[in-house]
């Protein structure tokens, strides 16, 4: 994890705030920027107090880039929305904790990378290898051909075939990672294909991700030598998607989690209408700009989907929250000033329209080309969150959830900033889950942010109300969130993961 040098000024500015007090969060780190300002008078409905934060840090006081233990998914309490948001926050801090085996947990041997095998299954869908992380300096990334609409590439990268272009005429890169329990569970399903009755002792595991201690015990017994256990088994099955840009493309790389990634080599033509991928990966220093944290938990085989972004990515549209100084929800209009990574200008766009589209070559995530749409050139498009916190903008009914997330982020980020912890520059933009059912659509008993979209990964899947998006084939708002693509049949929860059903091989 890259050390930082500028959080001390931010910490000093926040020193007068008690850990759980509602107050301003200056999520920019530099005195001349105003990225991701929060309102100053929100109610503290979901704050993390000092005792809880100490529990997250393994029973010790928070320290700079200190190790955080994962949330216990086996004993998860789903009685409040706040608990879902706190689950995501703790998991993110665990996943981005440094270890002596890698710069962050999700790039250490506890996790596996999902990479395309180059082969398709019998139905024409991409197949994947799960490979345990061995070298912390070769995190594999790729570009997105499409999501579920095209069988060539199934689940690596952007949520459609469009390309996120940075202001410096570069592209974003994406990785998919799963934890050891997920990888072991995938291997069990590979073994079960030739062993009838494999799941007789734990029948729900034949069609669902684990959610109970007994199911975790079954996976442990089947996968590990007698007496051994998974080091973080209580996290149950986890799948992550990470979004990265070149560290040279961000204003202050010292304020980002950085890593060396293997990215597709790109050659650009003279008029900037086509970027060809040579098929040869090359090392590049990358800065983390977004992450989806997805995991099964007690009562939730559909998995909880929590999303995080860097504070300097992009601005939000206005939203309502619960204020300490007013009985009714209060409207907050975020500013647009600052050194944004994915936004320029003074006005938040009504729509986010792509200028480029990626087409893979023969199903490869490293070959093919990025082509300009229509007769235009490949250009940067200012990005914004059109549905702040994952809800309809200016919706008073979303004020309680916005307030939960404001108070959660405020307390966590303030405490981390006081320790000069680089993770203080990241915050939860929202989470989504169901009432415990396997979602069959994006509207099937959905809870949390029913419009949740990460600007780094669902950039062009943000549907504004009452507007047509020219050039993108999109009309007025449609229900689009994680479960728009990650839905499944009601009797097969494993389909919520696009990687799981097409794992071809699990290797160390």
Image (cartoon, rainbow, N blue to C red):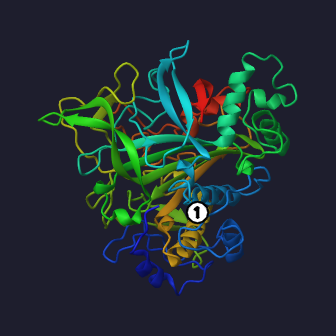
Q: Quadrant of residue 249?
A: bottom left
Q: Residue furthest right?
A: 201
* Image location (x, y in percent) of residue 120: 50, 17
* Image location (x, y in percent) of residue 263: 36, 40
Q: Quadrant of residue 484?
A: top right
- Image check: 364 left or right of 337? right
Reply above or below: 504 against 131. above
Q: Please give the count of numbered marks on the rendered protein.
A: 1
Reply above or below: 259 against 460. below
Q: Residue furthest top?
A: 122
Q: Quadrant of residue 237?
A: top right
Q: Residue furthest left?
A: 270
Quadrant of the snapshot with the C terminus: top right
- Image check: 212 left or right of 339? right
Residue visible at 75% across and 53% down in the picture: 78
> In front: 416, or 319?
416
Q: Secondary structure at mark 1?
A: helix
- Image check: 460 left or right of 151? left
Is any atom of residue 471 visible in this view? Answer: no
CA neighbours of label 1 inside 10 A, class few (<14), some (14 to 19), many (20+): many
Is any atom of residue 484 visible in this view? Answer: yes
Q: Residue furthest bottom?
A: 16
Residue visible at 42% across and 65% down in the picture: 36
Residue visible at 79% across and 33% down in the picture: 222
* Image location (x, y in percent) of residue 226: 83, 40
Determine which residue is flagged by label 1. Answer: 405
Reply above or below: 203 against 284. above
Residue visible at 31% across and 39% down in the picture: 354
Reply above or below: 177 against 391. above
> In front: 136, or 96?
136
* Image location (x, y in percent) of residue 132: 57, 39
């Amino acid at each position: 994890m890259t050390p930082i040098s500028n959080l001390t000024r931010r910490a000093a500015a926040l020193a007068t705030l008690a850990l759980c007090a509602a107050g301003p969060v200056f999520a920019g780190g530099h005195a001349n920027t105003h990225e991701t300002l929060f309102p100053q008078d929100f109610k503290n409905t979901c704050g993390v107090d000092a005792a809880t934060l100490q529990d997250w840090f393994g029973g010790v006081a928070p320290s700079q880039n200190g190790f955080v233990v994962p949330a216990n998914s086996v004993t998860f309490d789903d009685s409040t929305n706040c608990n879902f948001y706190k689950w995501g926050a703790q998991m993110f801090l665990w996943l981005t904790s440094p270890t002596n085996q890698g710069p962050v947990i999700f790039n250490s041997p506890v996790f596996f990378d999902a990479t395309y095998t180059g082969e398709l299954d019998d139905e024409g869908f991409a197949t994947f290898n799960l490979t345990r992380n061995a070298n912390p300096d070769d995190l594999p990334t790729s570009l997105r051909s499409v999501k579920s609409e095209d069988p060539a590439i199934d689940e690596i990268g952007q949520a459609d075939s469009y390309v996120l272009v940075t202001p410096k005429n570069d592209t974003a890169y994406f990785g998919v990672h799963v934890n050891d329990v997920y990888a072991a569970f995938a291997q069990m399903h590979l073994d079960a294909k030739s062993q009838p009755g494999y799941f007789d002792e734990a029948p729900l595991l034949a069609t669902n991700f684990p959610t109970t201690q007994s199911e975790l015990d079954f996976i442990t017994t089947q996968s590990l030598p007698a007496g051994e256990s998974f080091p973080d088994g209580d996290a149950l099955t986890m799948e992550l998607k990470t979004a990265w840009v070149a560290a040279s493309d961000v204003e202050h790389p010292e304020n980002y989690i950085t890593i060396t990634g293997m990215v597709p080599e790109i050659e650009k033509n003279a008029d900037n209408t086509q970027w060809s991928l040579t098929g040869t990966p090359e090392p590049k220093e990358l800065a983390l700009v977004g992450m989806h944290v997805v995991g099964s938990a007690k009562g939730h085989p559909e998995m909880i989907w929590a999303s995080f972004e860097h504070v300097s990515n992009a601005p939000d549209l206005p939203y309502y929250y619960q204020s300490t100084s007013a009985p009714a929800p209060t409207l907050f209009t975020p500013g647009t000033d600052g050194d944004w990574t994915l936004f320029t200008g003074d006005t938040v766009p009504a729509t986010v329209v792509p200028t480029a589209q990626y087409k893979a070559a023969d199903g490869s995530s490293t070959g093919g080309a990025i082509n300009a749409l229509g007769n235009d050139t490949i250009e940067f498009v200012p990005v914004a969150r059109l549905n702040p916190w994952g809800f309809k903008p200016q919706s008073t009914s979303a004020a309680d959830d916005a307030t939960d997330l404001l108070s959660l982020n405020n307390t966590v980020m303030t405490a981390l900033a006081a320790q000069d912890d680089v993770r203080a520059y990241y915050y939860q933009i929202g989470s989504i889950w169901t009432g415990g059912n396997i979602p069959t659509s994006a509207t099937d008993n959905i809870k949390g942010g029913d419009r949740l979209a990460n600007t780094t990964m669902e950039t062009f899947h943000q549907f504004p109300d009452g507007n047509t998006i020219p050039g993108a084939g999109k009309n007025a708002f449609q229900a689009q969130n994680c479960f728009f693509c990650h839905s499944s049949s009601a009797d097969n929860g494993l389909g919520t993961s696009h990687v799981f059903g097409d794992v071809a091989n699990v290797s160390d």
